[in-house]
Image: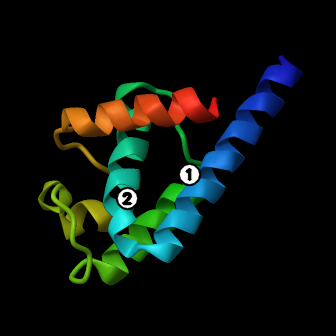
Amino acid sequence: MGKSNNLRRAILSLFDKQCLELVDDNKNMIVPWYLMASYAYYEQDNPILEDATFDRLSKVFLQYYDEVEHMHKYLITKDMLEAGTYQGEYPDRVKYALQDLRGSNG
C-alpha cells in the first residue's frame, strides 16, 4: 500500500504543478481546471489536485473572477468559490478533458 500511496502523491503533485503553471500563464485556464478538479473530486471520488491547491485555485479565481473569460465561467459563481466547492453541472467537454489528462499523465 505504501508504493500505491507514493505513486498517488506523485501524480497529484504532477497535476498540481501543471495546473498552477497553466493558471499562472493564463488566468482563463482557471475555469477548466476548477471544473475538472471538481468533477474528479465530487463525481469520481478520485481527486486530481491536493486540497490546498484546489483552495488556492478557488482564491485566485475569486480574485480575478471579473477578468476571467471562458465559455463555462457562467457555471461557477462567486459564492461557490468563496465556499470552495462546486455542485453544478459538468459539460461533457470537462469530462473528456479530465479523461485525456489522466490518460496522458497517469
Q: Provide residue 25's location: percent of width, then percent of height.
A: 50, 75
Residue at 63 percent across and 29 percent down: it is 106
Instruction: Report the residue marked by disc 1.
Output: 51
Characterize the local packing of mark 2: few (<14), some (14-19) or many (20 or more) Cα atoms within 10 angstroms. Answer: some
Instruction: Report the residue marked by disc 2.
Output: 84
Q: Provide residue 35's location: percent of width, then percent of height.
A: 32, 48
Residue at 42 percent across and 73 percent down: it is 26
Q: Residue furthest left?
A: 74
Q: Is 103 placed left or right of 34 in the picture?
A: right
Q: Quadrant of the N terminus?
A: top right
First in sequence, mark 2 or 1: give its number: 1
Considering the numbered disc 2 on the image, is that residue within a helix, a strand or a loop? loop
Labelled pair 2, 1 in contact (Cβ < 8 Å)? no
What distance separates the C-alpha of mark 2 from that of mark 1? 10 Å
Rendered position, 43 above or below 65: above
Task: Give the quadrant of residue 74.
Answer: bottom left
Task: Give the quadrant of residue 21.
Answer: bottom right
